Structure formats: C-alpha cells, structure tokens
Image (cartoon, rainbow, N blue to C red):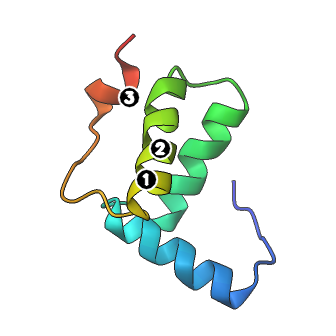
Amino acid sequence: MNLTLSIDEKVLGKARKVAMGMGLSLNEVVRRYLRTLAGESDSVSAFTELRTLFLEQGGHSKGSRFNREDLHRG
C-alpha cells in the first residue's frame, strides 16, 4: 500500500540525511517505525537504541549497522 504525506522540505531533507547515515532509505525508516508503532514488531529495544544513538551522536552511527537478527533478538 502506498501512503502520501505532507512534510516540510527542510524536515524531509534532514530526515533523509539521518536515514542515509543509518544506511537505510527514509522509506525503510518510516516502514520500520510504523510496524513498531502498530505493535507488529519486537524491535522496540532496537528502536530505543537507535533513538538513543541519534540523540547522543546527532544521527551519525559511525559505521554501526543493525541487521535483521539484531532487530528480532529478544
């Protein structure tokens, strides 16, 4: 399913840069967030870690990557 959003261009540009720094497309970041928000993902701890990384390091992961196993590890 496709979703259309209205987003300020400056916010969109910054969000794309953050997603790129995480090694993801903005589309994938939004998709993962919505799955977590809907309770369809066990990746709450990974999301929390990612949010902390963003807040502490300004969105730069310094090369750290998440993989599927990390996201679903319980």
Q: Which residue is mark 3?
A: 71
Which of the marked residues, 1 or 3, is nearer the chain's N terminus? Answer: 1
Can you tell which of label 3 and label 2 is closer to the viewer?
2
Q: Residue 56 bears which disc, if any? A: 1
Q: Secondary structure at mark 3?
A: helix
Q: Residues within 10 Å of mark 3 (few under 14, many from 20)?
A: some
Q: Residue sitting at 43 percent across and 36 percent down?
A: 49
Which of the marked residues, 3 or 2, is nearer the chain's N terminus? Answer: 2
- The single residue placed furthest to the front in the displayed view is 56
Identity, as a three-letter code, of the amino acid under mark 1: Glu
Tell me if 31 is positioned left or right of 39 in this view.
left
Tell me if 70 is positioned left or right of 4 in this view.
left
Q: Give residue 74's position: percent from left, percent from top.
A: 39, 10
Q: Which residue is mark 2?
A: 52
Q: Give residue 22's position: percent from left, percent from top.
A: 34, 59
User: Is residue 71 or residue 60 the one in the foreground?
Assistant: 60
**Cα distance between the residues tagged 1 and 3:** 20 Å
Q: Secondary structure at mark 1?
A: helix
Tell me if 34 is positioned left or right of 47 in this view.
right
Identity, as a three-letter code, of the amino acid under mark 3: Leu
Q: Are marks 2 and 1 in contact (CB under 8 Å)?
A: yes
**Cα distance between the residues tagged 2 and 1:** 6 Å
Q: Secondary structure at mark 2?
A: helix
Vertical position of residue 42 compared to residue 10: above or below = above
Vertical position of residue 41 compared to residue 67: above or below = above
Q: Residue sitting at 33 percent across and 63 percent down?
A: 60
Vertical position of residue 4 compared to residue 48: above or below = below
Q: Residues within 10 Å of mark 1 (few under 14, many from 20)?
A: few
Q: Residue sitting at 47 percent across and 43 percent down?
A: 52
Q: Residue 15 bears which disc, if any? A: none
Identity, as a three-letter code, of the amino acid under mark 2: Thr
User: Is residue 27 or residue 2 the one in the foreground?
Assistant: 27
